[in-house]
Amino acid sequence: MSPATGSRPFLLISTRDDPVAAEDEVRGFLAAADLSPDDLVVQALDAAPLPADLDLDDYSGILLGGGPFNSSDDPVRKSTTQVRVESELSALLDRLVERDFPFLGACYGIGTLGVHQGGTVDRAHAEPVGTAHIELTDAGAQDPIAAGLPRRFEAFVGHKEALSQPPANAVLLATSATCPVQMFRIGANLYATQFHPELDGDGLATRIAVYRDAGYFPPEMAGDLTELARSVDVSWPSLILRNFVRRYRR
């Protein structure tokens, strides 16, 4: 897809320090959102701080992917980089929420936005790497970000933490039996998902290889999980990203 004439790009904020995972995340967002490389600016927070004077008017919207950090990590054990990244994202979210600026955070993004808005993130609803049965709430079924989605669909997941209590001002858009907060909205334009709308089977296989020893699953299960990733049809979640792009491109 070629960039829309005169349109502003989207900004993808990446917290991944592994170059293979980071590169594949960019590929995944481009493909799932149907964006060209010119449509997406990538800010890698492991390489450089987020500019404090970031001009939001340069972008159509902000995307935040997953990463190696957990919002519920013991503060004493957080690295200097994690502390910096959390501080920078919190300051950015101050501005985004104040302006009700288009934002979509996936996985790490839901914990980041959830904590910022007063929700509770803990380890009670972790999900193993694989697929989850996602169900839209009544509000989710009526939200433009979910336009065209079936009421129930499969999505790729894999996380050590999740929201056990959403922010009081959040509108719950999707849930699942194993993780009650799968997607929510703040205001009219800030969204977050626990599942990965940017992931396809190849992308999940890449992350299985990269994070084999990171504690998301027993390493000896990597082969079976890779086979699963490439054998299931998980195509509906990417529609969320395409809806986001269509709605906010300017």
Image: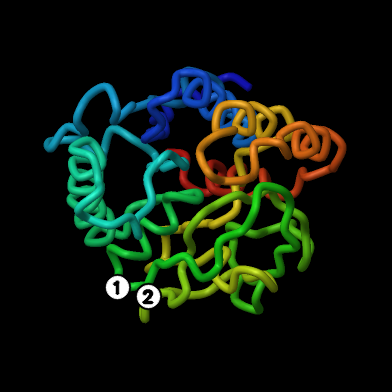
Badge 1 element: loop
* Residue 133 screen position, x and y as percent: 75, 62
Residues packed near mark 1 inside 10 Å, few (<14), some (14 to 19) or many (20 plus): some
* Residue 123 screen position, x and y as percent: 47, 65
Name the mark on residue 167: 2
Between disc 1 and disc 2, whose residue precedes? Answer: 1
Which of the image's four quarters has the N terminus?
top right
Residues packed near mark 2 inside 10 Å, few (<14), some (14 to 19) or many (20 plus): many
| Left or right position of 200 against 198 | right
Q: Nearer the viewer, residue 111 or 210?
A: 210
Residue drawn at 58 percent across, 24 percent down: 27
Question: Residue 176 sits in which quadrant?
Answer: bottom right
Which of the image's four quarters has the C terminus?
top left
Q: Nearer the viewer, residue 197 or 21?
A: 21
Residue drawn at 71 percent across, 52 percent down: 155
Badge 2 element: loop
Residue at the spot of label 1: 118
Tell whether label 2 touches label 1 (CB within 8 Å).
yes
The Cα–Cα distance between marks 1 and 2, rounded to whole angstroms, is 5 Å
Q: Amino acid at mark 1?
A: Gly
| Left or right position of 142 against 131 | left
* Residue 54 screen position, x and y as percent: 19, 35
* Residue 171 screen position, x and y as percent: 48, 75
| Numbered disc total | 2
**Can you say whether 31 is above or below 187 in the image?**
above
